[in-house]
Amino acid sequence: MRTEAEQHPIGVFDSGVGGLTVLKALRKELPARDYLYVGDTARVPYGRKPREMVEQFAWEITQFLMDKGAEAVVIACNTASAASLPRLADEMPIPIWGVVEPGVNAACKLTRTGHVGVIGTRGTIDSGAYQDRLRARGLRVWAQACPLFVHLVEEGLAESEEAELLAHHYLDARPPIDTLILGCTHYPLLENVIRRVVGPETAIVSSAEAVATMVRETLGAAPIAPGHQPGKVTHFVTGDAASYRHTAHQIGGVEGEIVKVDSLAPAVA
């Protein structure tokens, strides 16, 4: 039997489907848990919106997940993590993690030379979320926006010749680095291609795996009891559910019920 603590779901959210890579990493680390995933596809992308607006979105979604019974929340979105933490974590009564800090922590542990690279969407790179934290720890940082990577992943072309050509385009001019952070939740699906381009001597940090490890270390993970299935997933989508299902299928991890919701804002009494 799963313990009472194991019966409370973990909430996960992103502006779209990229956060499903974080969900998959969490399910690998904590397989007995139930999960509630919010894909805020009606308001994607967050990266082009004002920071204050994204912070409000993050607060609304966290409150929505808490109202659904989540005992902890993972912000599986780089833009929302940068905009809303640590303030959101300070204001909410449950544990909340983002993907930026765990990725930075992992890179700091792995680098041998102090030269670290980070790739992400243009919004994430322009925000300086990773660069500022890495430089504050005394590291030298190279950053590169890779905006077309997201489209390749969502079109199911993560292992294509086009993906490899684009990876060379974005990464061949990098300076000497020994560690590279994948600063977008879509990018773990491109890890094989990226690894071929940067070579085996460069450590690759997946923020998805880093935050999943942090959550497991904090909450603890119980094994799946004999005769029991892994925990279930419920997806809440603000945009078109059929489009979400189609795009998420390219990423995987879409198992579970998909529920269309018209609003994530708390009801006004």
Image (cartoon, grey):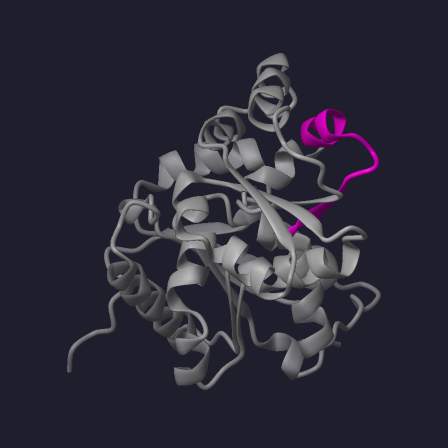
- Above or below, comparing residue 116 to residue 190 in the picture: below
- Above or below, comparing residue 155 to residue 244 in the picture: above
For the point 53% across and 54% down, the residue is: 131
- Residue 205 belongs to magenta span: yes
> Number of callouts in the render?
0
- Which one is in front, 145 or 253? 145
Residue 33 coordinates in the image, percent (x, y): 65, 67
- Above or below, comparing residue 115 to residue 195 in the picture: below
Q: Quadrant of the C terminus?
A: bottom left
Q: Is residue 234 visible?
A: no
Residue 226 coordinates in the image, percent (x, y): 84, 65
For the point 41% across and 54% down, the residue is: 79
Residue 73 coordinates in the image, percent (x, y): 50, 70
Give, as a single range, the part of the protein colored magenta. 192-206
Q: Is residue 47 visible?
A: yes
Residue 74 coordinates in the image, percent (x, y): 52, 65
- Residue 222 belongs to magenta span: no
